[in-house]
Image: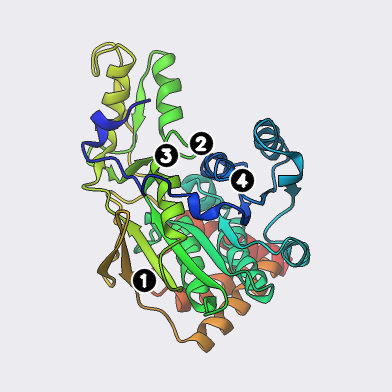
Amino acid sequence: MDWSDLLLRPKIEAGTDSAAHLAGESILVAGAGGSIGSHLARRLITARPQRLILLDRSEHDLYQIHAELSALSHPAHLTALLTDICDDSAMEEILESARPDIVYHAAAFKHVPILERNPLSALGNNALGSWLFAKACVRSGVPRMVALSTDKAAGPASVLGASKRIAELALMRLSDSRTRITSLRLGNVLGSRGSVVPLFQKQIARGGPVTVTQAEARRFFLTLDESVELLLATAIVPGGGNLLAPELGNPLSISHLAEFLIRRAGFTPGKEIALAFTGLRPGDKLSEDLIATNERRMEAVGSGLYRIATPAPAARELDGWLAELQQAVERRDGSAVLDTLSRILPEYRPSETVRQALEQSRREVRA
């Protein structure tokens, strides 16, 4: 679908051949079966890498992207690995064996309402999984790691945002001259499985109503193609320990997106297809930001990207807190999780839904 009429900004393009520098490289994509990971893999295979390693925990998703790319590449150049980034020993074995030149980390849980009810899974996968994965990359001497983050990490209101913010801090801490790690914050990706677009389209096909949380709710949007271009551009930004964000113009109204899709389907919003406003859910913000109030926008680094100066705990403190968080999540000790979260992210206020889920975990531990 052509989204230009909705976005009303120039299309983001990293360059005429943003993947050319990857020719002959060994590349690993974690989360390769997801919407962004699979779109990235399709782009990478055209760069003729020496080897493309597709890694995912979903057998179905991994099978789909591997079968698709196998028709475009010599089998020896393509590997499918069914594993979890949280499996530390498996990841270390893979990285030591494959010796990738660059790792793209796009593996994450990302549905706000589901994660609000499952905070231990959110923190275990998104925060601790990213931390363990990055540590394995550092130990194995991977030269470059690019991690996908989200605007929800800027002043997080949801456990999704909190988990991704912790991942940003952990990866900044681990980046060094041997393994350069950069995180890229993106907004909502149109057409991805995690976006509202497939939901709106199904609701339109049923005759409505199209459900929008609140009329004033606004989000940053970009396309799958733009997301991949930005990930490719991030890989060639000098230095490590960076937190980057793209130029995305102004945030757009979600109700405007719903009306856009209704018109594209040949209907009139408010007449043939109604909009229903359901109210903000636990963890939702009225408007997302790419930069938090305690952060600063820094210099542009090309391809529509700029650096973000962001506060971070002292390295030794963060190391200790991450270890404590890992132990608390493994014990399913909700009280200890909340205590550690308050030290890592004092700005984060967990919703009542998150608190109740963690309180239930605490009762289970006591039982």
Image quarter (top left, top right, bottom left or bottom right) of the C terminus: bottom right
Q: Mark 1 or mark 3, which is nearer to you?
A: 3
Residue 306 quadrant = bottom left
Q: Which residue is under mark 3?
A: 225
Residue 259 quadrant = top left
Q: Give the left or right position of residue 155, taking residue 112 as reference.
A: left
Helix, strand or loop at label 3? It is helix
Please say if the residues under marks 4 and 3 sit with CB atoms less than 8 Å apart: no
The percent coordinates of residue 107 (x first, y second) are 58, 52
State the residue at coordinates (21%, 36%). 8
Packing grade of label 1 (10 A; few <14, some 14-19, many >=20) is some
The disc labelled 1 sits on which kind of residue?
Glu
Disc with the residue nearer the chain's start (4 vs 1): 4
Q: Mark 3 or mark 2, which is nearer to you?
A: 3
Q: Which residue is under mark 4?
A: 32
Q: Mark 4 or mark 2, which is nearer to you?
A: 4
Q: Mark 4 or mark 3, which is nearer to you?
A: 3
Q: Is 22 situated above or below 266? A: below
The percent coordinates of residue 110 (x first, y second) are 51, 48
Task: Report, in whole angstroms, how far the alpha carbon at label 3 lies from the one at label 2.
Answer: 14 Å
